[in-house]
Image: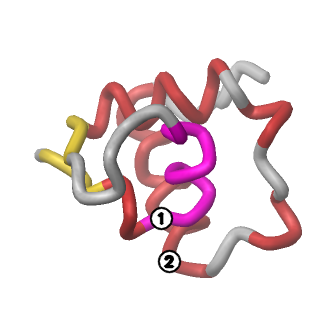
Amino acid sequence: MDVRISDYPGLALLAWNRGGDDAIDEAEAFALYERNWRYVDEANLGQSERQFLADLVRRFGHGVLNV
């Protein structure tokens, strides 16, 4: 399933070099979060983005976010 980058502000910061209306697949979104976690401001992640990330971790990280 494709994800619109602009729907998740934390993801949008990580994908700064792409257009805000661009869409990426969920596996790529997970890879962006995992690879660039040091730039994520956890305190400012909204509830929907936290839930989205938890779903990605469960599906693509087998319950683990390697950061």
The tag earlier along the polypeptide, 1 or 2, is 1
x and y, in percent, of residue 59 in the image: 36, 36
- Residue 36, relative to residue 21: is it above or below? above
Cβ–Cβ under 8 Å for marks 1 and 2: yes
What segment carries the magenta color? 8-16
Task: Residue type at mark 2: give it.
Answer: Ser
Which residue occupies the extreme left position in the image?
1
Q: Is residue 25 left or right of residue 40?
A: left
What SS does tag 1 mark?
loop
Please tell me which residue is depicted at 39% across the width and 28% down the height of the picture.
Answer: 60
Residue placed under numbered mark 1 in the picture = 8
Q: How many marks?
A: 2
Task: Residue type at mark 1: give it.
Answer: Tyr
Please tell me which residue is depicted at 20% across the width and 46% down the height of the picture.
Answer: 23
Please tell me which residue is depicted at 49% across the width and 38% down the height of the picture.
Answer: 15
- Residue 45 lies in the magenta-colored region: no
- Residue 57, relative to residue 3: is it above or below? above
